[in-house]
Image: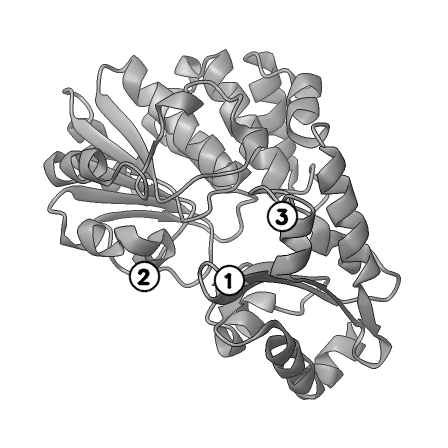
């Protein structure tokens, strides 16, 4: 995003606009944190702004300021489409391809609104007039902070905005332990704390809210953990029956794949979760070092993401998906064993 783009966006935002802000399907902490942080800034500037999420998100994010104003497209379709069709500007946050919004893809693609993308994932599609894309950033929330800096409005970040941005940076950096966490990231976090973000309370609200059933589900997942030492790979499976038995709620499997990655000498980790309602197997991939799960997922599982964190899906059974995954590993044996 160059200086000319910033000047044009500043000009756009000088008068009240009808604005829609969209995260990706199955939004996570970074998607919800970034959209809520941007929303509150725009509302404070007297814009008529609304977040429209493709669907629901985990309960551990439902304490955030203004969270209850978010529309869900899958259950509030008519109201959502009216807002999209009449919007002057549409911000898309934490994704860079419209298919990541699921059933919202067509209406967003057909919208005449000016589109502004803020995202840190690799290989963006060219659908937005203004693109702020940087794969080196830890999170979209960090990018929103930089976006505010470009607009010269950092002084307008209040406690609520700071809280939302802190959540997204914290969750997308694995509590500041991933390689994408830079000294700049820490300086931004320090500023957000200075502006009112309560780091201890935020951590407690996101991570210390386990239900009994979620911990039982974690036990089930770890019981299903398999290790392939010849490929320095570990994977977890969860069937629909196992999810139902333990009263699965959206977000309950968040972070489970990291337990597989934490195994000594493991370079590649995966979790395969059966979703019979959608007829797919959801896949989360994690890696260490330079092994790219973004490229791996794009090549084999219709997904993508970052070098060390990506997602994908399979339309076959859980067993056949795992079988395919294992059959692919010999292709990457040298890369995995050289890490």
Label 2 with label 1: CB-CB less than 8 Å: no
* 275 or 268, nearer to the observer: 275
Label 3 with label 1: CB-CB less than 8 Å: no
Q: Residue 201 is drawn in which quadrant?
A: top right
Mark with earlier residue (2, 1): 2
Q: Which mark is residue 338?
A: none
* 235 or 330, nearer to the observer: 235
Find residue 324 and report its horizontal and vertical position in percent.
62, 82
Q: Residue at x 41, y 49 (%)?
A: 25
Circle 3 residue: 180
Find residue 231 and report its horizontal and vertical position in percent.
79, 79
Q: Residue at x 51, y 26 (%)?
A: 62
CA separation in Å, label 3 and label 1 = 34 Å
CA separation in Å, label 2 and label 1 = 30 Å
**Residue at disc 2, secondary structure:** loop
Circle 1 residue: 276
Left/right of residue 52 with respect to residue 107 in the rendered view: right
Find residue 151 and report its horizontal and vertical position in percent.
33, 27
Circle 2 residue: 125
Label 3 with label 2: CB-CB less than 8 Å: no
Marks 2, 1: nearer the viewer: 1
């Amino acid at each position: 995003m160059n200086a000319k783009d910033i000047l044009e966006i500043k000009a756009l935002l000088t008068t009240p606009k009808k604005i829609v802000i969209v995260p990706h399907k199955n939004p996570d902490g970074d998607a919800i944190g970034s959209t809520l942080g941007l929303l509150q800034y725009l509302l404070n500037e007297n814009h008529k702004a609304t977040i429209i999420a493709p669907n629901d998100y985990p309960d551990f994010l439902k304490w955030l300021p203004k969270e209850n104003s978010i529309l869900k497209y899958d259950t509030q379709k008519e109201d959502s489409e009216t807002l999209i069709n009449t919007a002057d500007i549409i911000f898309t946050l934490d994704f860079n391809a419209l298919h990541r919004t699921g059933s919202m893809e067509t209406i967003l693609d057909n919208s005449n609104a000016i589109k502004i993308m803020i995202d840190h994932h690799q290989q963006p599609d060219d659908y937005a007039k203004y693109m702020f894309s940087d794969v080196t950033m830890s999170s979209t929330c960090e990018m929103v902070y930089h976006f505010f800096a470009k607009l010269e409005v950092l002084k307008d970040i209040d406690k609520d905005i700071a809280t939302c941005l802190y959540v997204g940076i914290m969750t997308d950096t694995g509590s500041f332990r991933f390689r994408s966490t830079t000294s700049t990231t820490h300086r931004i976090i320090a500023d957000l704390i200075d502006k009112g973000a309560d780091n201890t309370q935020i951590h407690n609200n996101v991570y210390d809210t386990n239900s009994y059933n979620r911990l039982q589900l974690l036990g089930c997942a770890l019981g299903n953990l398999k290790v392939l030492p010849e490929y320095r790979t570990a994977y977890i499976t969860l069937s629909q029956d196992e999810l139902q038995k333990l009263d699965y709620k959206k977000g309950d499997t968040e972070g489970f794949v990291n337990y597989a990655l934490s195994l000594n000498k493991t370079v590649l980790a995966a979790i395969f979760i059966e979703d019979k309602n959608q007829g797919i197997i959801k896949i989360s991939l994690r890696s260490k070092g330079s092994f790219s799960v973004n490229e791996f997922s794009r090549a084999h599982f219709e997904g993508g993401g970052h070098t060390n964190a990506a997602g994908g899906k399979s339309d076959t059974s859980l067993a056949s998906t795992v079988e395919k995954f294992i059959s692919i590993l010999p292709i990457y044996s040298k890369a995995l064993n050289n890490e």
